[in-house]
Amino acid sequence: MGTQQILLIVLSVIIVGIAVAVGTMMFNAHSITSNRQAVVGNMNSFAASAFSFYRTPLEQGGGGNSWSSDVDDIGVWMGYSYDKPTNTITTVNGTFVLSINGTKLTILGTGNEIGTNGSTNVQGQTVADASDFSIVTTIIN
């Protein structure tokens, strides 16, 4: 083989290596973004369901314009796999912990993918405030 052919082979291997590395980084970035969006979507859906529970009369199994004394009733109302001892809802996108503080229901969602910081999973928090029926979502990682 001539020197020119060896140089072309080495150059081709370098270009293919760079292309594989860039493709892998793009795939990982998409996985993180996709999981983050799914977690935020779940949290917003849970908050909307919780408001539905809040506004439904007690006679119909709802909260009667009150959060329950605990989140058990809200978790069951949402219809997901709900673990009562830990107040946790589990979906294919991650785990979500519910807590009540006065008029606020806080949902802390943890995804399945490692977040952009490279060490902890994707995480977000949604606060559903019954005093003004607002839903505020914050991305943590």
Image (spheres, rainbow, N blue to C red):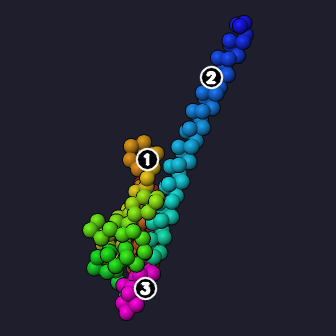
Dot placed on the residue nearer the N-terminal end, 3 or 2: 2
- Label 3: few (<14), some or many (≥20) within 10 Å? some
Locate residue 46, reporting x and y percent.
44, 71
Q: Is mark 1 on a helix, strand or loop?
A: strand
Q: What residue type is labelled 1?
A: Ile
- Magenta region: which residues? 50-63
**Res 114 label:** 1
Which tag is nearer the camera, tag 3 or tag 1? 1
In three-dimensional space, the C-alpha distance between marks 3 and 2, rounded to whole angstroms, equals: 62 Å
Q: Where is residue 63 in the image (x, y as percent from the top left)?
A: 36, 84
The amino acid type found where label 2 is placed reads Ile
Question: Three-letter amino acid code at disc 3?
Answer: Arg
Task: Indicate which disc residue 90 carries.
Answer: none
Question: In this figure, which residue is indicated by the disc labeled 2?
Answer: 14
> Which element type, helix, strand or loop, lies under badge 3?
helix
Location of residue 39 with respect to 33 vertically, above or below: below
Measured in 3D between alpha carbons, the distance from the residue under mark 1 to the one under mark 2, in whole angstroms, is: 29 Å
The residue located at (40%, 90%) in the rendering is: 60
User: Badges 3 and 1: C-beta atoms under 8 Å apart?
Assistant: no
